[in-house]
Image: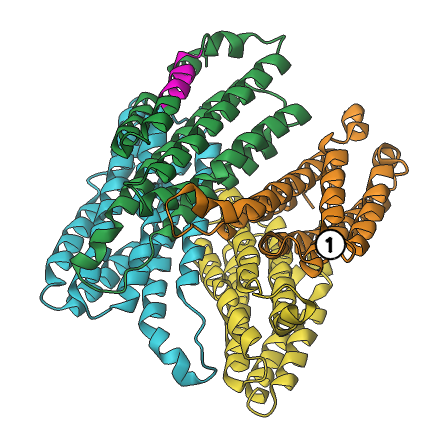
Chain colours: A orange, B yellow, C cyan, D green
Amino acid sequence: MDKGRLEAFSDGVIAILITIMVLELRIPAGATGEALRPLTPIFLTYVLSFVMLGIYWNNHHHMFQVIDRVNGRILWANLHLLFWLSLIPFVTGWMGEHYSAAVPTAVFGIVLIMAGIGYTILVRVLVAEQGADLRLARALGSDVKGKVSLVIYAAAIALAFVDPWFSDALYVAVALIWLVPDRRIERLR
Amino acid sequence: MDKGRLEAFSDGVIAILITIMVLELRIPAGATGEALRPLTPIFLTYVLSFVMLGIYWNNHHHMFQVIDRVNGRILWANLHLLFWLSLIPFVTGWMGEHYSAAVPTAVFGIVLIMAGIGYTILVRVLVAEQGADLRLARALGSDVKGKVSLVIYAAAIALAFVDPWFSDALYVAVALIWLVPDRRIERLR
Amino acid sequence: MDKGRLEAFSDGVIAILITIMVLELRIPAGATGEALRPLTPIFLTYVLSFVMLGIYWNNHHHMFQVIDRVNGRILWANLHLLFWLSLIPFVTGWMGEHYSAAVPTAVFGIVLIMAGIGYTILVRVLVAEQGADLRLARALGSDVKGKVSLVIYAAAIALAFVDPWFSDALYVAVALIWLVPDRRIERLR
Amino acid sequence: MDKGRLEAFSDGVIAILITIMVLELRIPAGATGEALRPLTPIFLTYVLSFVMLGIYWNNHHHMFQVIDRVNGRILWANLHLLFWLSLIPFVTGWMGEHYSAAVPTAVFGIVLIMAGIGYTILVRVLVAEQGADLRLARALGSDVKGKVSLVIYAAAIALAFVDPWFSDALYVAVALIWLVPDRRIERLR
């Protein structure tokens, strides 16, 4: 099976997710700068989620460069990742409106850690199905960044109940770790 | 006519449908775990519909692998399928909010059975138009899974008026039947 | 310039338009069949607009089959058409909620006639720019269907102030005229 | 890395942005012409933003014609541009509802100037990464139109606090400057 439609479908879903989040930025009733101020935490959460989805899209793009064909297992591993990503607008809106509350901050982290696990599963499935071609397996190596992210997310979920600001700092830290695209794969090409 | 744009358009519509359903998960007013609890049935219905649309996308993807060209009749059979799929977010939201009520549960099944019929019609049109190439006709054979699904949907619609939980169990059963992608076509390639 | 991105962009916009209309089908508060009844005119208007957008997508698809390259003028003629199509969800929702009122019914027709004019302009620009290749010009011939549609729309707009049902019947008539894809172009290929 | 997915993703995001703006045109409660009148400024702002996004899409389309490959830096410069474009529906809705107020009009300009800067950065990154191929660098030359636009936007933001109509006139002026597609690149092909 050709990978083209899987890429197009994933691009479509991520493009829609990254865009509908902006619908959570509800137009303020007033016309002054003060009317805009309550939107600040929602806006900052939007920026964070935009970057997170951008990272997923970039890494997805990189990873599928070295893939030639897809099959049913890969399609479903990919849909599983997209499912968790699809919840990002919801948790972004909820955390944005209650940025100082523990539960929305922790739930934001739970969706991110599930998306991270979904991405890890997708990588594993791709490596397993592309057995003959070891380029991808070698390229991903021990996947240190992926494992570190999952640990940081777990810490962020727990720390949300101490102080949500710790969690926010950790979410930003993960984004910064990933903003550098995966040179390991780029080097292969 | 080339099949590329039909695939791209269908991918676009299904990607949008699978994503806008998440807009029905309205952000709760509170910031506690209890505020999230009333969303549970809506969330579970969302998961079911996400899987259903994922199945349609996967099968659509598989089926068009063996198609070379499209014509006006195929375009309209495809649009007819997309029409019924486009109603899934609506019935998902309605059933999610009234999960113990008979009518929304039955209407959910009516949209699913119409989408199933739409898919069957699309298969028939493809087989008829690709007469010379019998690969597809042979591949689909007697289409047991498709017929069984329609029977289960019909039972689910009727049973919604006895107890909606019977219907929910049957909808999940259809999803499980289809989660295995159509090996009959994969084998051909 | 390659026509691929123009097709992909148009497919994307039409796929989104055809899908977001369903957001106008607001989930009823009740869980009974009666709760669904007030949605009937909105649902029927949705069906009509779905078919209309499907016709535009099909004809767009057909027409660009015989086009090789695009330029700035073609891009803008295409965006002009997409602009009027983008208003269809708005007028669909308004007419659906006030199906027996003159003004929403007439405004629905105004958007349709403007989209029809936009399509005619796009055809003209394509014929002008593809001068050397007369296949398209010959294929479209005198464009009887296009002209007849504009006349019917004009009549429907005027008749909305007599009785909106006349207009509705005429909108359905135009849809039926176009449901047959444009054989003139198909014949060329 | 192939540029295809970057183009497809950008097309998707811009197609969604240009379409969801229409959701700000809320369906009026009444069914008369007067009910439509309060929508006039929102509609005109929608037209302006539609043209602006159309210009970005056209220029993006033109520019990537002369690009062969993309890398991580280009992906992120492109996502940065898309981020500012993603705020256009929000500021369009806000300015449309408060068209005579200074702050929404200025904020509209701030988003446009940031998008303009994002586009300039993208051009710079593309020129830097495509060093060997000087076609793009020569094609863009001194980028007079881009610089003029940024100056006009800055003036419009300041003048919003004198009279928002000055700003509106300047926004329209920028749109008119760009409606002519970038012949400099078209000439190269």
Residue D124 sits above or below residue C36 on the image: above
Dividing the picture into quadrants, the one containing residue B96 is: bottom right
Residue D181 sits above or below residue B90 on the image: above
**Judging from the image, what secondary structure is the residue with disc 1 in?**
helix
Dividing the picture into quadrants, the one containing residue C184 is: top left
- Residue under label 1: A72
Q: Amino acid at mark 1?
A: Gly
- Residue at far front of view: A34
Which residue corresponds to the image point at 38% horizontal and 20% vertical from the top-left? D149
How far from the left and from the top, in percent, is residue C186? 37, 44
- For the N terminus of chain C, the image quarter is top left
D148 drawn magenta: yes
Crowdedness of circle 1 by 10 Å Cα count: few (<14), some, many (20+)? some
B49 drawn magenta: no
Instruction: Give, as a single range, the part of the protein colored magenta.
Output: D143-152
Tag 1 subunit: A
Which residue corresponds to the image point at 40% horizontal and 81% vertical from the top-left? C35
